């Protein structure tokens, strides 16, 4: 990071304490009013204003994942990065998958993991490529010496006002990255996953309350819900648990790289009952719970982390 980025990062975390301290959820993180901004897809955490909080300065581990070996897709920034930081602080080694253009963000997350005394492996690759998906679990297992946690988190989200303007190419790309990649990665990972292993897929509040500008994205997130519930039943006899997490409005680079209409950014997340957008680190404990043995009787569940929006 440059000096101004470092200053901004420190400012972003001055008011936070660790996730185990009693705090008012309304004021735990600032009610941000993001300025209109634009980044080329997929966007970088280091260029986001205000910076998102991935738990670097606040997440405190308690050994809940000691010795585990995790592969996380989309783990260079946002929710995936926060989950990677939390997993490492909980004692896991982590393989990070991300797009090659996100290398700067990925190296930052790697450094945080290594500072926690855990192993980090960088595995860049575009999940719209079937061959990348099929090879990724093998590479992760080889580098980590095994694999027992898979987090399918990578996602593509581009807002389009009218279905007439939604190109077939965008629809295809969104489905390839968001749901087809999950099928492919799970299939390739199963030979490495032993009884006790866990799979956690990232769905979204959009699966339940689809925005009219996110038709393709919301549809894939609903598909992930169904995929997760069906797969959970199929793999339960093998002792492999599958669950999902459904984030609400979380401040990540996804939002400024055409994930939201630019004019909507200043009001992002303010319609939730808590009155603010969530930070990526607020998602991390949900993934830790579902990946840990504490949730041994939880299968096919979608855990909502959305600031209070009622879900069915």
Image (spheres, rainbow, N blue to C red):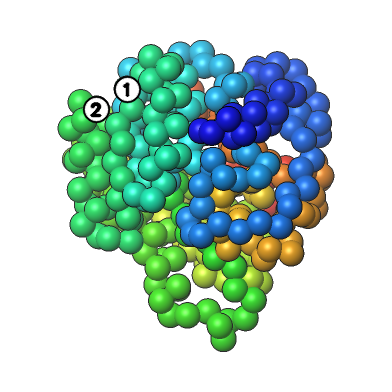
Q: Secondary structure at mark 2?
A: helix
Please state which of residues 222 and 80 is positioned toward the viewer in this rendering.
80
258 relative to 69 in the view: left or right: right
Say which residue label 1 marks.
119
Percent coordinates x, y for residue 59 in the rendering: 57, 22
Please state which of residues 40 and 116 is positioned toward the viewer in this rendering.
40
Disc ID at residue 144: 2
Q: Give the vertical position of 127 relative to 304 (above or below).
A: below
Q: Residue at x 19, y 40 (%)?
A: 138
Q: Residue at x 38, y 20 (%)?
A: 114
The residue mark sitting in front, 2 or 1, is 1
Question: Crowdedness of circle 1 by 10 Å Cα count: few (<14), some, many (20+)?
Answer: some
Q: Secondary structure at mark 1?
A: loop
Percent coordinates x, y for residue 58 in the rendering: 61, 21
Residue 258 location, quadrant: bottom right
Point out the residue furthest to the bottom here.
164
């Amino acid at each position: 990071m440059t000096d101004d980025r470092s200053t901004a990062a420190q400012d972003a975390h001055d008011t936070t304490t660790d996730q185990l301290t009693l705090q008012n959820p309304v004021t735990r993180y600032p009610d941000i009013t993001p300025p209109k901004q634009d980044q080329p897809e997929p966007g970088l955490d280091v260029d986001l204003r205000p910076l998102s909080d991935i738990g670097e300065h606040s997440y405190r581990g308690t050994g809940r994942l000691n010795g585990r070996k995790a592969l996380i897709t989309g783990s260079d920034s946002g929710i995936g990065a926060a989950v990677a930081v939390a997993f490492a602080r909980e004692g896991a080694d982590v393989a990070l998958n991300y797009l090659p253009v996100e290398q700067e963000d990925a190296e930052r997350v790697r450094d945080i993991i290594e500072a926690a005394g855990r192993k980090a492996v960088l595995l860049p690759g575009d999940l719209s490529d079937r061959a990348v998906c099929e090879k990724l679990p093998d590479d992760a297992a080889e580098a980590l010496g095994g694999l027992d946690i898979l987090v399918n988190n990578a996602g593509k989200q581009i807002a389009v006002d009218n279905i007439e303007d939604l190109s077939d190419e965008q629809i295809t790309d969104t489905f390839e990255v968001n749901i087809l990649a999950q099928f492919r990665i799970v299939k390739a990972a199963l030979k490495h996953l032993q009884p006790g292993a866990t799979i956690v897929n990232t769905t979204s509040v959009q699966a339940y309350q689809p925005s009219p500008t996110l038709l393709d994205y919301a549809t894939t997130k609903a598909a992930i819900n169904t995929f997760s519930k069906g797969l959970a039943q199929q793999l339960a006899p093998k002792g492999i648990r599958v669950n999902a997490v459904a984030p609400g409005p979380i401040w990540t680079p996804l939002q400024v790289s055409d994930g939201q209409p630019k004019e909507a950014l200043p009001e992002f997340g303010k319609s939730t009952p808590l009155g603010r957008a969530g930070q990526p680190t607020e998602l991390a404990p949900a993934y830790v719970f579902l990946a840990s043995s504490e949730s041994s009787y939880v299968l096919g569940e979608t855990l909502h982390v959305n600031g209070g929006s009622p879900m069915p």
